[in-house]
């Protein structure tokens, strides 16, 4: 999938897609999808020294199509534009120059979320050096296993609920 903000896959890199599916109940799906589309979920939920910022009047409230953002910290500079948003799909398209660890190793292209009956799915597309792919896959497997999307499913009082298995 070619993005207007991104180049074609550079020589010496390959497109790699991280795909994760998180089983959830329909009730959980509604709450998670709502939170997944709010700026404050990402602005307030970052672990220091990482940050997410939006080029918007407020760092709270729902995303708007075309809105710019950046996720940054040591070894990370992922800046992009919020693309299409529907009740079942959202995409963040990363700009040329975004990187993870090094611009020469991993270049994010897009982050897509899908809302299915009984699951939330994510697809992270990147250009990756072939030798880095197993490390990148392992790191994402570990990250999503421990962090997942459970932070998006909370009671109004902030107490976490268990996700469906």
Image: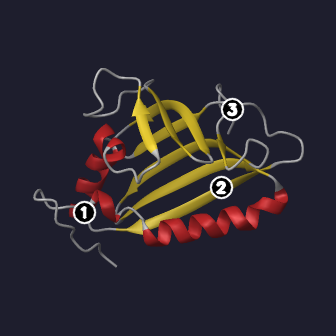
Say above or below: 11 vs 114: above
Residue identified by numbered label 2? 17
Residue at mark 3 = 97
41 and 62: which is toward the camera: 41
Q: Residues within 10 Å of mark 1 (few under 14, many from 20)?
A: many
Identify whether 50 is placed above or below 8: below
Question: Where residue 135 sits in the image (x, y, percent)?
Answer: 71, 66
Looking at the image, which residue is at 48% across and 72% down?
A: 145
Residue at (35% x, 23% y) in the render: 56
**Residue designated by label 1:** 28
Q: Is residue 59 left or right of residue 11?
A: left
Residue 146 screen position, x and y as percent: 45, 71
Rate crowding at label 3 as few (under 14), some (14 to 19) or many (20 or more) other CA atoms within 10 Å. Answer: some
- The quadrant holding residue 53 is top left
Q: Is residue 16 left or right of residue 28?
A: right
- Furthest toward the left, the residue is 157
Question: Please, what secondary structure does the residue beneath circle 2 have?
Answer: strand
């Amino acid at each position: 999938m070619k993005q207007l903000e991104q180049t074609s896959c550079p020589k010496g890199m390959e497109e790699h897609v991280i795909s994760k599916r998180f089983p959830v109940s329909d009730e959980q799906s509604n709450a998670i999808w709502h939170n997944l589309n709010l700026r404050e979920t990402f602005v307030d939920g970052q672990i220091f020294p990482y940050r997410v910022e939006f080029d918007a009047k407020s760092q709270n409230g729902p995303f708007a199509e075309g809105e710019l953002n950046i996720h940054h910290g040591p070894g990370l500079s992922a800046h992009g534009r919020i693309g299409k948003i529907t009740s079942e799909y959202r995409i963040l398209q990363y700009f040329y120059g975004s990187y993870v660890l090094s611009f020469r190793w991993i270049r994010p292209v897009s982050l897509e979320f899908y809302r299915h009956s009984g699951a939330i799915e994510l697809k992270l597309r990147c250009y990756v050096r072939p030798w880095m792919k197993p490390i990148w896959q392992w790191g994402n497997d570990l990250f999503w296993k421990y962090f997942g999307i459970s932070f998006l499913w909370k009671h109004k009082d902030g107490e976490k609920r268990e996700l469906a298995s």
